[in-house]
Image (cartoon, helix red, strand yellow):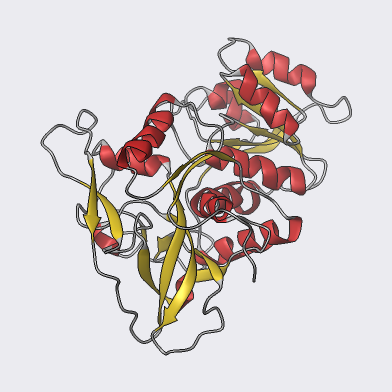
Amino acid sequence: MPYSLTVKKTEGKPGQVYYPLQLNTVPIPTPGPGQLLIKLSAAALNHRDLFIRQQLYPGISFTSPLLADGYGIVTAAGSNSHPLLHKPVLLVPTRGWASDPTGPEDLAKNFTILGASRLAEGLGTAQEYIVVDEADIVPAPAHLTPTEGAALPLVGVTGWRALVSKSGNAEPGRNILITGIGGGVALQVLQFAVAKGCNVYVTSGDEGKIERAVGLGAKGGVNYREGDWEKKLGGLLPKDRPYLDAVIDGAGGEVVSKSVRLLKPGGVISSYGMTVGPKMDWVMQATLKHIELKGTTMGSKREFEEMVAFVDEHKIRPVVSRVVKGLDNVEGIDGLFEDMKAGRQFGKLVIQIDGDDSSSKL
């Protein structure tokens, strides 16, 4: 019998409880009309999954499999035929957001992310087989391995929207600051911005992560643990463009007060997360400089398709930090969560569910 991985409910307060992982055996589902059966090859973790285990995320299901990111092979179609039958695909990681550039069409009722969600029961990628609607997959770029493909979906669409759709500065020669390099979204933004010809700068509390970011194309970086990091960053900017055009931020905290000194008038802070805390200070200097603060998270199906096409065109390979093999390797998967809690990862944490990790062949 195939496996699925869920969380088991235990008593405790939000932020203090830590739901254990539960391995289950389940039957292979059958696709109905307009549906496809996917045999999953790999799945990846996101911070949302850690928040679910800590009861810090709403609408948790304890019967639906975890995880939103998945790469797999179409093995059956409800209509008995489909052009992607026996081909590798990526799963669209969200539901309820088709194309509206301002946000989900019905955020309150229908929008959700796959994985342990009551609004998407059964739709998590921590399982060996999954049934999805035909519209909720895209062909996997042929240059990606299964683990690389699984590393892409949610961080890819989140980073694409933050950089391309929201910042308006994904242009050659623009100076872009990416905070907290090492996380999945930040690294995807780095790869997208470099491919678009931007001058990319990064922050991190780990000098080694800054060095690795430079190896991926960043022009330089600064350690945010140093109190005057914005001054050091200013010294790295090119003399013919000594300012930032945009900041892509997932931390919050002091990002406004620190970056406002470097942002051009009318510059943009595109914020996709606030890991430092749930509040961000707004300073008068930002108002006087006409700085725009834009909140953003996830992305539409249309943006997902645009992002995957860009990855395919530029042959971008998502950064994978560590892989464990086997959905039944609960101890190993718990270790991936420990990496995330400690902030040890540089890139995505991935579970190889099935087979080897050779490149896909369309």
The image shows residue 60, relative to residue 137, as above or below, that is: above
Residue at 53%, 76% in the rendered image: 86
Q: Position of residue 303 (x, y in %)?
A: 57, 61
Residue at 75%, 43% in the rendered image: 194
Snapshot quadrant of residue 47:
top left
Q: Position of residue 348 (x, y in %)?
A: 52, 41
Relative to the observer, which residue lies in front, 241 or 90?
Answer: 90
Q: Quadrant of the N terminus?
A: bottom left
The residue furthest left is 11
Task: Give left or right: position of 42 versus 235.
Answer: left
Q: Quadrant of the C terminus?
A: bottom right
Relative to the observer, which residue lies in front, 287 or 38?
Answer: 38
Decide if residue 114 is in sight here.
yes
Residue at 56%, 73% in the rendered image: 87
Q: Position of residue 257 (x, y in %)?
A: 56, 22
The image shows residue 56, relative to residue 109, as above or below, that is: above
